[in-house]
Image (spheres, rainbow, N blue to C red):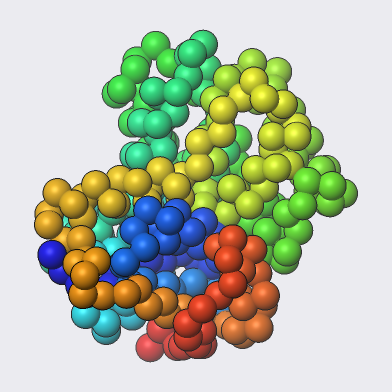
Amino acid sequence: MDNRPIGVFDSGLGGLTAVRELMDLLPNESIVYLGDTGRVPYGTRSKETILKYARQDINFLNTFDLKAILIACGTITTNGLDMIQKEYPLPILGVAEPAARAAAAATRNGRIGLIATQASIRSGLYERIIRAESPQTEIFSVPCPLFVSLVEAGHYAKGDPMVKLAAEEYLTSLQEQKIDTLILGCTHYPLLSDAIEDFFGPAVTLINSGAQGALTFREMLAQKDLLADPQQVSATYQYYVTDRTEQFSRLAAVFLGRPVSGLVEQVVIDQ
Ligand code: DGL
């Protein structure tokens, strides 16, 4: 048993889709969340910049006495999880491998779509993991850079004209490829699930990378005997952002699917 909090971070609000899942799966775990809202998006940047930002994120989280960290960001996971795991002593997991494995298990026709940020698609990591699992599977990848900005700006409803337009632009080629499974490889994208489901209809299974990451994170905590003792602790939540807290507080409740309880504070992490 370990009653210390877990750390979760993302370039912005997207990682809250993983936090939502963690809150359901592990109601006794305390969480320290960092959203680097001052520098979102990461997905349009170089690997070097993504890694620099990720290290600053982790160095901030490490000012708390954490037992483990979930990188609730497809972009950081695909561009640096292996390196980051070697640099820090505590257990650190990402979202790409759990989502890729879930997709490989879910597909029936062997045709998987992947939507993610440009940096994630460029890394090729999701594809490599799926091919290692099932070499015959065909994977069709499309970067969807505008999805992150739309979500961060509060445009996620399926009837929203801007969301509809972006969905048509990004998803039409995947529909033509007759995929039956779609990886939402960026943790912001599950907020667009209604719009994406509306576009594809029920024949395409959506794989939520944040939720899959949270499931694997729970398994890891259990295996390492790091789960909190439910008799001793009740969960507390702290949220840190690198830009104004107002926008975060407004949208966080939507991402979390519940009111935001706990501290929300703006911090400086790049010094
Ligand atoms: N939520 C992120 C991801 O999972 C990052 C989006 C971005 O910053 O571009 O990729």
Quarter the C terminus occupies: bottom left
- Quarter of image, res 224: bottom left
Residue 211 in picture, x, y percent from top left: 45, 47
Tell me residue 109's x, y (percent): 51, 11
Q: What residue do we see at 59% from left, 48% from top? A: 190
Residue occupying the point 35% across, 22% down: 131
Is residue 136 among what the camera can see? yes
Image position of 224 with respect to 193: above or below: below
Q: Position of residue 170 (x, y in %)?
A: 71, 37
Q: Residue furthest right?
A: 161
Left or right of residue 244: residue 45: left
110 over 270 or under it: above or below: above
Q: Which residue sits at x=67%, y=25%?
A: 202
In the image, residue 102 above or below residue 262: above
Left of 242 or right of it: where is 8?
left
* Viewer-side residue, 233 vs 172: 233
